[in-house]
């Protein structure tokens, strides 16, 4: 007796919007939010610890909304991938040379996200979390941008979608949460909808 094998069901087609960033702010709101982040950092508005946190929370969503998927994003990913590829090629054919460049780049962005979490935590949390909670962005003098803060904000804003696994899910979730949190701020402050 022959048994009829069930025919496998085809995998569903991806959603037409899969991989496309859905913008929650207008281009004007993005520009205003980015300017606000620059002014908060440049003019040293408020205490250092709060200023850095506010500037970072404003900058990451503005960069993600304004530049994710842009030529700047593509250039950044391409440059970082080329650098990693050169490092892997420099190993002279060692076993590590077979590592996935995309996975390494995603892991680096995930590690940057973990570093930023340490910088954003209040110092009081060091009693339970140890020295991790004492990480800070270096202090910048008046009328100077905090370079390390902006490098972290730009890289996370452009490449938050690269890490995989749990760290990647948390990274994307936090960036999406921050974007939703500050999306209405330009309209509330300046009427820039």
Image: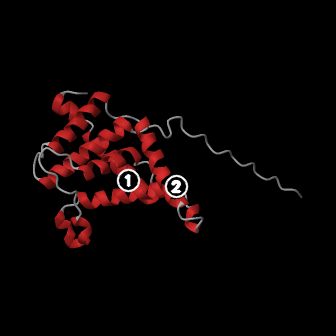
Q: Answer few, some or many: residues within 10 Å of disc 2's Cα (few below 14, many 20 plus, some between 14 and 19).
A: some
Q: Which mark is residue 19?
A: none
Residue designated by label 1: 171
> Height in image: 114 above or below 186?
below
Lower position in the chain sequence, tag 2 or tag 1:
2
Tell me the quadrant of the picture where the C terminus can be found: top left
Label 2, label 1: how many angstroms apart (C-alpha)? Answer: 24 Å
> Height in image: 100 above or below 127?
above
Label 2 SS = helix
Identity of the residue drawn at 35% across and 45% down? 157
Give the left or right position of residue 129, taking residue 165 as reference: left
Instruction: Using the rendered view, name the quadrant where residue 63 is placed.
Output: top left
For the residues carrying marks 2 and 1, which lies nearer the camera in this image?
2
Residue designated by label 2: 85
User: Residue 23 location, x and y as percent?
Assistant: 37, 34
Label 1 SS = helix
Residue pushed farthest right?
A: 1
Identity of the residue drawn at 12% across and 43% down? 43
């Amino acid at each position: 007796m022959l048994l009829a094998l069930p025919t496998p069901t085809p995998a569903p087609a991806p959603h037409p919007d899969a991989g496309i960033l859905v913008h929650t702010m207008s281009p004007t709101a993005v520009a205003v939010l980015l300017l606000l982040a620059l002014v908060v950092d440049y003019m040293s508005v408020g205490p250092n610890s709060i200023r850095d946190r506010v500037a970072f929370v404003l900058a990451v969503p503005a960069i993600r909304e304004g530049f994710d998927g842009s030529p700047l994003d593509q250039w950044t990913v391409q440059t970082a991938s080329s650098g990693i590829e050169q490092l892997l090629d420099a190993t002279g054919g060692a076993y590590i040379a077979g590592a996935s460049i995309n996975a390494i780049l995603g892991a680096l962005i995930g590690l940057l996200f973990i570093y930023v979490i340490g910088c954003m935590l209040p110092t009081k949390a060091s009693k339970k979390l140890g020295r991790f909670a004492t990480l800070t962005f270096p202090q910048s003098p008046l009328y100077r941008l905090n370079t390390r803060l902006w490098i972290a904000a730009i890289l996370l804003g452009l490449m938050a979608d690269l890490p995989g696994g749990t760290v990647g899910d948390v990274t994307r979730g936090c960036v999406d949460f921050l974007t939703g949190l500050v999306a209405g701020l330009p309209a509330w402050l300046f009427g820039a909808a």
